[in-house]
Amino acid sequence: MTGQPKKNIRFIRLRTVIDKTGLSRSTIYNKIKSDSKYFDPTFPNQIKLGGGAVAWIECEVDDWMLSQIEITRS
């Protein structure tokens, strides 16, 4: 991330990403896996929290959802 970080950054775990987007676990991982035929370079990447735990940045997931709405409605 470049520049000033956004305020109120919140890490969300996979269960929350699933709940927010309505996507399945496998679909989410296919969207971030670059060698998948379902790879979506616009989908937010996970970040490592340590100890094998990963999370997504909530505002990035929200921005992706808004972009999908704009694409669909334009």
Image (cartoon, rainbow, N blue to C red):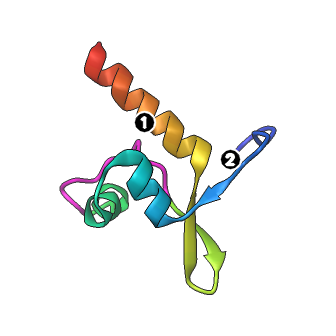
The x and y percentages for residue 28 are 34, 58
Q: Nearer the viewer, residue 7 or 40?
A: 7
**Number of residues whose C-alpha sits closer than 10 Å to that of mark 2, classed few (under 14), some (14–19) or many (20 or more):** few
The one nearer the camera, 71 or 18, is 18
Spatial separation of the CA atoms under disc 1 and disc 2:
19 Å
Q: Position of residue 23 (x, y in %)?
A: 30, 53
Quadrant location of residue 55? bottom right
What residue is rendered at 23% in x and 61% in y? Answer: 36
Q: Secondary structure at mark 2?
A: loop
Q: Which label sits on residue 1?
A: 2
Q: Is residue 5 above or below residue 31?
A: above
The residue wearing badge 1 is: 65
Read off the magenta span.
36-45
- What element does badge 1 sit on? helix
Which mark lies nearer to you, 1 or 2? 1
**The disc labelled 2 sits on which kind of residue?**
Met
Q: Is residue 46 above or below residue 62?
A: below
